[in-house]
Amino acid sequence: MTAELIARVRKMTKDDLGTVLAWRNHPSIRNVMYTTDEISMGEHQEWFKNREGDNKTRLLIFEVNEEPQGFINFRDVGRGGIVEWGFYLAPDAPRDNRRLFGRVTLKYAFANLGAHKVCGQALVSNTRSTRFHKILGFVSEGMFREQHFDGEKYHDVEYYGLLQSEWRAKMADEKGPA
């Protein structure tokens, strides 16, 4: 008998700083970010302090069976429920939990934040992220050519969007006939 997975999204706290920093500085995550330098705990604490009081930003932790397995950042970018997200899963998170991460996180955005649309972006070279967005139902909304300079070369950035109506239709399709 397989144990039931209980997944949820909760607010990030100061107690999560060490865990999130370790994930962010892990080479598998750091190497696909806009900033690839290792971040110090002091920089990380300052970042958290600056965002903690910002009512337009939500810093969240994805948990499975009360074990932290991912980080999510939602930021209001426009009127009418348009939010932008950024995320990463823990380097040691089970691969099977990726789709669960997407479902629970997007459900939170549409149900709890009242999002009309979730926007995302990824360096085109970050094939895991570009593939993940497409699996979740995001639509490519454009390519910004040579949009990011990493200090050595330019990178293309792909922009994605997922409407609440598209999300609902996808979830209904995946549940199948009643």
Image (cartoon, rainbow, N blue to C red):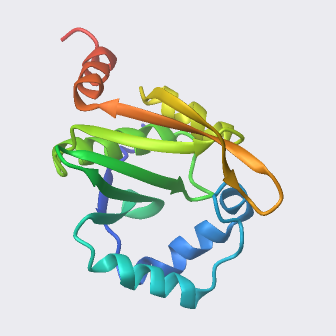
Percent position of residue 32, x then y: 68, 53
Pick the residue in front: 167 or 4: 167
For the question of whether residue 94 can be seen, the reply is: yes
The image quadrant that residue 39 belongs to is bottom right
Q: Is residue 119 above or below residue 178?
A: below
The N terminus appears in which quarter of the rendering? top left
In this view, the residue farthest toward the bottom is 42
The image quadrant that residue 37 belongs to is bottom right
For the question of whether residue 97 can be seen, the reply is: no
Q: Is residue 26 left or right of residue 143?
A: right
Percent position of residue 45, x then y: 47, 86
Residue visible at 72% across and 41% down in the picture: 125
Q: Is residue 129 above or below residue 43?
A: above
Residue visible at 31% across and 78% down in the picture: 52
The image quadrant that residue 102 belongs to is top left
Q: Is residue 21 left or right of residue 12?
A: right
Percent position of residue 165, x then y: 22, 25
Pick the residue in front: 90 or 127: 127
The C terminus appears in which quarter of the rendering? top left
Q: Is residue 178 left or right of residue 117?
A: left
In this view, the residue farthest toward the top is 177
Residue visible at 44% across and 64% down in the picture: 68
- The count of marks equals 0
Residue visible at 35% across and 63% down in the picture: 60
Q: Is residue 98 above or below residue 59?
A: above
